[in-house]
Image: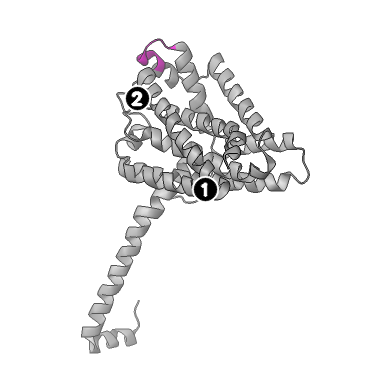
Amino acid sequence: MPSEGAVDAARSHPEESGPRMQHKSHKDSRVSHFTHNVFRPFILAWHFLTAIPISRRHHDAPAEELAASMAWYSTVGLMIGGLLALIDQGLRWWMAPEVVNVLLLVLLVLLTRGLHQDGLADTVDGLAGGRTVDDRLRIMRDPSIGALGATGLFLSLLLRYAGLLALPQPWRLPALLCMPAVGRWAMVCVAWGSPAARRDGGLASAFLRNLSWHHVLLSSVVLAVALTIGFGRGPSLVTMGVGVALILLVRRGCRAWFGGVTGDLLGATNELIEILFLLFVPVLVMTR
């Protein structure tokens, strides 16, 4: 409650209290607008991409906010990469490189709840077992993982492990930092302008309907800055260029084989691009 002195002051100077109250109200409105348009989409992106809760609010978001959250995917990816790099620096002092790489893979899967690995396995099952678009989508919806899906998942983890082991030591830190950001940026680019594969919408439809070039641009700028700082201007341009070419191929494959994009396909995209980035780093540093 306001004190009696404050009430008396407002009464004795009504011409001053009114503008001050209006100014405060306008300021509060701007803070609320900033929180709603910036902080809330970031929270949504963080909760969707990681298993670490940072807020109990911001659930059941409308489609517009889900799409806006994708602008923050590269940022969340950099934060995940930063945690991986920090753990890597600590473990390498007293563990063999092979053990550290395995622990990093375990940590990455736990951080993301295995969401993207599940999408990759479902995608492999769909491609292997379906002859038509409807067959592939039906197989992908099956919660069980088939033999080929499990094999594809195993091989993806093996390739990621080999990529980590082959990283040149001077570039290990920027590679770990940027790897999750590259994969999540690819998800945003594949989703932009792509139709939903399922007639009933599915998980991806809420993101696809309202995703705009502004969201893609912000995600791209964040990644480009991180790559430039970590690897230099030349490797950054090469990475973005190769990434765009791969994204166009993935988009074409999604349309041809599945009729559009699903959540599983976006997860598979993340896995594919992250692994290729790791394998590409030794070649990338030669462009410096």
Q: Residue 242, image x and y in percent?
A: 47, 33
Q: Residue furthest top?
A: 131
Q: Residue furthest left?
A: 15
Q: Quadrant of residue 211?
A: top left
Which residue sits at x=55%, y=44%? Answer: 80
Give the structural element (helix, strand or loop) at label 2: loop
Q: Which residues are magenta?
A: 130-136
Which residue sits at x=42%, y=45%? Answer: 219
Residue 168, disc: none
In the foreground, 178 or 28: 178
Asked if 138 appears above or below 276 in the picture, the reply is above
Q: Is residue 110 visible?
A: no
C-beta proximity under 8 Å, tags 2 and 1: no
Residue type at mark 2 is Gly
For the C terminus, the quadrant is top right
Which class describes the residues within 10 Å of circle 2: few (<14), some (14-19), or many (20+)?
many
Is residue 171 covered in magenta? no
In the foreground, 94 or 285: 285
Residue 260, disc: 2
Which residue sits at x=37%, y=45%? Answer: 217
Which residue sits at x=52%, y=48%? Answer: 228
Residue type at mark 1 is Thr
Q: Residue 227, image x and y in percent?
A: 52, 45
In the foreground, 6 or 117: 117
Q: Which residue is tagged 1?
A: 228
Is residue 133 covered in magenta? yes
